[in-house]
Amino acid sequence: MRVIYQHQGDVKAYLDFAQGTGLTAEDCLVLAEMLMAQDKPEAAYGLARLKREILMKLGRGREALDGAWANYREHPSKFSYDELMKYVPEAERAVWHAKALEAATEGDLHSVILSCSSRPRRLTNSSSAFARPPIEIWRH
C-alpha cells in the first residue's frame, strides 16, 4: 500500500497507513519527498530533519550526516550549516567546516559569508595568545 500511496502522491493516505503499521525513518524520507513534489518544502524539511534524528538514535549517525551534507550541498546557508554540524563528530569538525566552505563557494557569496560567520572562534587560555611583539621606536 505504501508504494501505491507514494505513486499517487497521497500524503495523507500514506501517513495514515504508515502510522498504522509503524512509521519508519524511510517513511519520513518518502513523505518528505512527496511534500517537496507538492511544493511544501517547510513540511518536507521537518520530516527530513526528523529522519536524521531517528537515524542518530538508531546508531546510524553516518547516514544522518550524509543526509545533512546532501541538504547543505543543495541549499548552503547558515541554517543548513548549523544542521550539518550537529551530526559531525567533534574530531572531524575542522575538516567538515573546510568542506562546507568549499561547497558554499560554488553557491552565492551570501551563503559563503553566513557559513564563515557560523564557525565559533576559539581563544586559548594562554596569555601568549594576547601578547604582542614589542614595538621598537627608531630614532634618527
Image: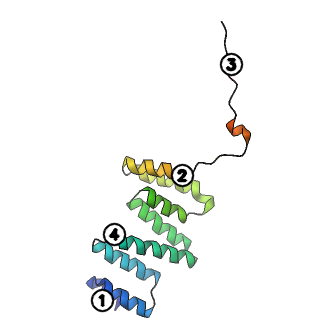
The disc, 2 or 1, on the residue closer to the chain's N-terminal end is 1
* In contact (CB < 8 Å): disc 3 and disc 1: no
> Which residue lies under the disc numbered 1?
4
Tell me how far mark 3 sits from mark 4, CA to CA: 60 Å
* In contact (CB < 8 Å): disc 4 and disc 1: no
Give the colouring mode of the picture: rainbow
Mark 3: amino acid: Glu
Vertically, is 8 above or below 20? above
Name the spot of residue 54 as percent of width and height, x first. 51, 78
* For residue 30, side relative to residue 101 (left or right): left
Q: Residue at x 38, y 61 (%)?
A: 74
Q: Nearer the viewer, mark 4 or mark 1?
A: 4
* For residue 138, side relative to residue 120 (left or right): right
Name the spot of residue 110 as percent of width and height, x first. 39, 49
Tell me how far mark 3 sits from mark 1, CA to CA: 79 Å
Q: Residues within 10 Å of mark 3 (few under 14, many from 20)?
A: few
> Which residue lies under the disc numbered 4?
41
The disc, 3 or 1, on the residue closer to the chain's N-terminal end is 1
Mark 4: amino acid: Pro
Mark 2 falls on what kind of element? loop
> Which residue lies under the disc numbered 3?
136
> Which residue lies under the disc numbered 2?
119
Tell me how far mark 4 sits from mark 1, CA to CA: 22 Å
